[in-house]
Image (cartoon, grey):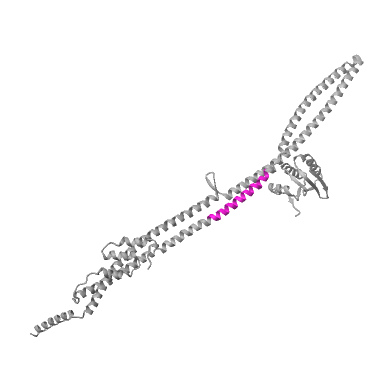
Amino acid sequence: MSTSNTASDNNAAAIETSNADKTKPLKEKELIKKWVELGLMIDWISTQSNTEIESLSTYLEGEVTKLVESFREISASATVQSQNVAAIIETSTNVHINQKYVPLIDVIQDLDDLMTLMINDIVDISKSAMHMVYIMQHAIDNASQINHSLDSIYAITRDTKYLAVNALIEAARAGEAGKGFAVVANEVSELSESTESLANKMGEDIKSFTSQLNEGFKLLEDIASKDLTEQMNTKEEIDATLTALVQQTKSQRVVLEETAQTSTDISDSISKLIMAMQFQDYTTQRLQHLITASEGFKEEINNTIKTTEQSNILDEQIQELTEEQAMAMLDKFSLSNIKKNYLKSFNNEDTQEDVEKEITEDDDNIELF
Amino acid sequence: MEIKAEHNENEVKVYISGKLSFKDHPEFNSFIEEIAVSKKNVLFDISDLEQIDSAGIGMMFLSQKVMEEAGASITIRNPRGQVKRVFEITSIEKQIPVINDN
């Protein structure tokens, strides 16, 4: 009995409480209603904010990836440029001869050696030519001596002939006794004739030989008298040109090496930049944490709203925000695109594209209040 | 070319001036052959030699040959201007001693 009474008392108490709730002052109900409406607004804003954050995170990830890719291409180009410059350095200091690359400095040394050989040859030729001139001069002098000797032979032959004629005259005077002597005198006369004939032949030969010798000597003089100092002087000019060429190549090499180093530095800097841009992963994680925290917050708010509704404290169920309430809150937003996104969200429209569009628009389009 | 000799006890100083070229070879050669007889070392003073051609270089080398055959040597002193330049190009000092007063 007492139990039945207790239950009955409890029910009565509940009815009384319910009635008491209904009879709560309007101000208190309005306050609770305001709290529920605030909860709904926070839920809506959190939902849209999470969408914004996710869109931003996705957009950021995509753009950073593109940026990193672009920087990688620049880095690769800088590396290629560095290699090209290195190749230019290689070819500028080498000369392609007989299908192989020879260092320019070696080529110049070879040319210098060749020039030295040429000069030595010129000196040797000059020396030999002068030596031959001296020898031929001696030969001409000797030929002249032979001509003098021939003149002596002519004189001796002439005297011999006179002697033979005189001997024949004396032999004739002697009569029979001089017959033998006449034979000898005739022999001597014939001998001197033969000697004269031979001397004439030698004279002609010597004349011809001397003529040829003089002709050769003249030719040799023409060769030996050629002044080759001009050719020797070319060595000085070539040396000066080669020295200037080496100097120019060295200067060029310095500039090219600096260029190659700059390209390498650019490539290294970009590589470091790419490494630094890995912040995007970190940012994505942090944004995801924000969303997770916000979702937890939303869940708690929704649970509170649900508990309030189930308590029947309020006379009516509040399930949605009114447009008026939403607009009142959005008036505090300064960026029109953000405001538009929230309105679209309020009307259950997709806002993903608008987030990206808003980010990619020029700064000029940002409305400042 | 002008050439003259100054005979000292141990050497003969030969002064050459003007231009030493091919056309001077008969006089130059006779001069050297006469000096060679003395068998004394020769010092060519060419301070006043203004020009030399390739034949002149040849004659200098041949004079060395003649003197060496006679048992003596030659030295060149004070090449100037164009002569000095030709001597440098031909590296003549590798074969004939060259001295400079300053």
| Image side of residue A344 versus residue A21, left or right | right
Residue A300 vertical position relative to residue A351 in the rendered view, above or below? below
Q: Residue at x 74, y 34 (%)?
A: A218
Q: Is A47 in front, or is B44?
A: A47
Q: Residue at x 41, y 57 (%)?
A: A70
User: Residue A241 lies in magenta, yes or no?
Assistant: yes
| Quarter occupied by the N terminus of chain A | bottom left
Residue A170 vertical position relative to residue A132 in the rendered view, above or below? above
> x and y percent of residue A197 in the render?
80, 22
> x and y percent of residue A330 in the render?
31, 69
| Quarter occupied by the C terminus of chain A | bottom left
Q: Is A322 in front, or is A101?
A: A322
Dominant secondary structure of the residues highlighted in magenta in the image: helix
Q: Is A349 in front, or is A287?
A: A349
- The part of the chain drawn in magenta is A231-256
Q: How many marks?
A: 0
| Image side of residue A33 versus residue A335, left or right | left
Residue A91 vertical position relative to residue A38 in the rendered view, above or below? above
Q: Is residue A192 visible?
A: yes
User: Residue A170 lies in magenta, yes or no?
Assistant: no
Q: Is A87 in front, or is A145?
A: A87
